[in-house]
């Protein structure tokens, strides 16, 4: 689906950059990120990021937490960039991210109220974490790369991330 304006494209680039940044920090490998995803039978979306996980990470007890953070990192990066503090559950375009995070929270705790509190706490923590200057600079670099290329893979961003991982 084509983005209708430069501002939507930029917001989407920051959104996807949030997913990419947090996914790679947690040890994932970026398979593909795109500002122009192919239309398929899945939910309507403006951007798409796919991260692969090694078996050793998938088997960790905190893997659902990792997936929560990766899912919420896109909306949090977009809120920081836009300055709009909208809750991720209330933006239609972010519903897939919120649902993914909620499904992972269900694995961590059975009570819905505690799941929501947990996700809201994760959002607040991610918001603070992503706003740190060196993290926000990295996200901006990834967003710029996406805006220039429309599609990026792991090797495209690996040089950018080397100095973040030290």
Image (tube, rainbow, N blue to C red):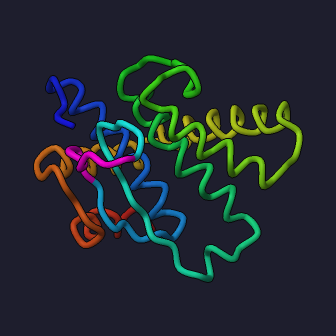
Does residue 62 belong to the magenta stretch? no
Q: Residue at x 53, y 47 (%)?
A: 71
Task: Say which quadrant the N terminus sits in.
Answer: top left
For the point 40% across and 31% down, which residue is it?
Answer: 78
Instruction: Tell me where residue 79 appears, x and y as whole percent.
Output: 44, 26
Is residue 161 placed above or below 2 in the rendered structure?
below
- Choose top left, top right, bottom left or bottom right for residue 26: bottom right
Left or right: residue 32 compared with residue 124: left
Instruction: Name the quadrant containing residue 64.
Output: bottom right
| Rendered-image quadrant of the C terminus | bottom left
Residue in front for this viewpoint, 74 or 124:
74
Above-or-below relation of 118 to 21: above
Q: Position of residue 41 (x, y in %)?
A: 37, 47
Residue in the foreground of this view, choosing between 97 and 129: 97
Using the rendered view, name the quadrant where residue 144 is placed.
Answer: top left
**Residue stretch in magenta:** 34-41
Taking the magenta stretch, the answer to whether it contains residue 37 is: yes
Residue placed most toward the observer, 158 or 59? 59
As drawn, is 152 to the left or to the right of 54?
left
Q: Is residue 3 above or below residue 56?
A: above
Q: Magenta region's main secondary structure? A: loop
On the question of residue 156 being in view, the answer is yes
Q: Is residue 166 visible?
A: no
Total labels: the figure holds: 0
Position of 124 relative to 21 (above/below): above
Q: Is residue 142 left or right of residue 122?
A: left
Return the x and y of residue 106 as percentages of the image width and height: 77, 48
> Which x, y percent locates residue 121?
72, 35
């Amino acid at each position: 689906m084509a983005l209708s304006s430069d501002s939507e494209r930029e917001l989407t680039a920051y959104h996807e950059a949030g997913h990419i940044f947090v996914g790679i920090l947690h040890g994932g490998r970026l398979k593909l990120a795109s500002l122009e995803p192919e239309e398929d039978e899945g939910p309507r979306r403006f951007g798409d990021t796919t991260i692969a996980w090694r078996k050793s990470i998938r088997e960790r007890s905190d893997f659902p937490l990792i997936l929560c953070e990766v899912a919420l990192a896109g909306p949090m990066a977009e809120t920081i960039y836009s300055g709009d503090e909208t809750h991720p559950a209330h933006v239609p375009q972010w519903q897939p991210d919120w649902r993914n995070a909620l499904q992972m929270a269900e694995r961590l705790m059975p009570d819905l109220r505690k799941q929501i509190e947990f996700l809201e706490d994760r959002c607040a923590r991610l918001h603070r974490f992503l706003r740190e200057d060196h993290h926000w600079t990295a996200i901006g670099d990834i967003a710029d790369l996406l805006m220039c290329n429309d599609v990026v893979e792991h090797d495209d961003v690996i040089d950018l991330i080397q100095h973040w991982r030290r």
